[in-house]
Amino acid sequence: MKVSKDAAAAARRLYNLCKADGKVDEAKFSKVVKTIAERKPRNFRGILVTLKRLLEIDLAAKHVTVDSAAELDTTTKQGIVTKLTAKFGDDLTFEYRVNSALLGGIRIRKGDDVWDGTIKSRLENIANAF
């Protein structure tokens, strides 16, 4: 769905009003969405679509996915959590996955940032160099 500039701007303003201390207040956000759905202002579908997209981006930026070739022990998991929360804040969510195709090492993804220390990526870099 194509969203007009006016609807996107209105959605950004509303989204910023829902934030308290840099975090989205669920009660405010839910009230805004409910009010828009009830009143149906001009371009309300575009506003709702943009609000959803902004929320998804915000949530993805606070979600950390850790891929490893083998199951990580609790010490390693705690070290990852400690370092990332010290750098990005304590409102992160963590997901740990085992992917044997990585051969070894760890890949950490937080939003659009990826830290890749896997053997598979190193081998691919060497293969691409030739």
Image (cartoon, rainbow, N blue to C red):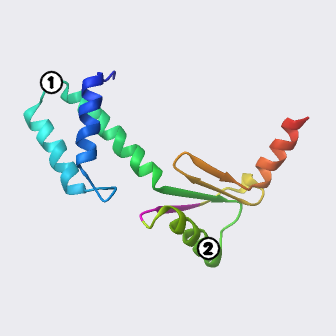
Position of 105 compared to 19: left or right? right
Task: Tell me which amino acid carries mark 2.
Answer: Gly
Magenta-colored span: 91-96
Task: Tell me which amino acid carries mark 1.
Answer: Arg
Q: Is 114 within the magenta? A: no
Query: What element does badge 1 sit on?
Result: loop
Q: Which residue is mark 1?
A: 42
Prevalent SS, magenta region: strand
Query: What element does badge 2 sit on?
Result: helix
What's the residue at 14%, 37% (across, down)?
A: 36
| Residue 22 placement (x, y as % from top left) | 34, 56
What's the residue at 38%, 44% (across, down)?
A: 56
Name the foreground residue: 69 vs 77.
Answer: 77
What's the residue at 11%, 30% (across, down)?
A: 40
Name the foreground residue: 104 vs 93.
Answer: 93
**Is residue 22 positioned above or below 126 on the image?**
below
Q: Looking at this rendering, what residue extends furthest in the right direction?
A: 130
Q: Which residue is mark 2?
A: 79
| Residue 15 placement (x, y as % from top left) | 27, 43
As measured in the structure, the alpha-carbon distance from the residue carrying label 2 to the one carrying label 1 is: 49 Å
The image quadrant of residue 5 is: top left
Name the foreground residue: 120 vs 57.
Answer: 57
Q: Looking at this rendering, what residue extends furthest in the bottom direction?
A: 75
Other-residue count near label 1 (Cα within 10 Å), few / some / many at <14 / 14–19 / ≥20: few
Position of 105 compared to 98: left or right? right
Position of 103 compared to 129: left or right? left
| Residue 21 placement (x, y as % from top left) | 31, 59
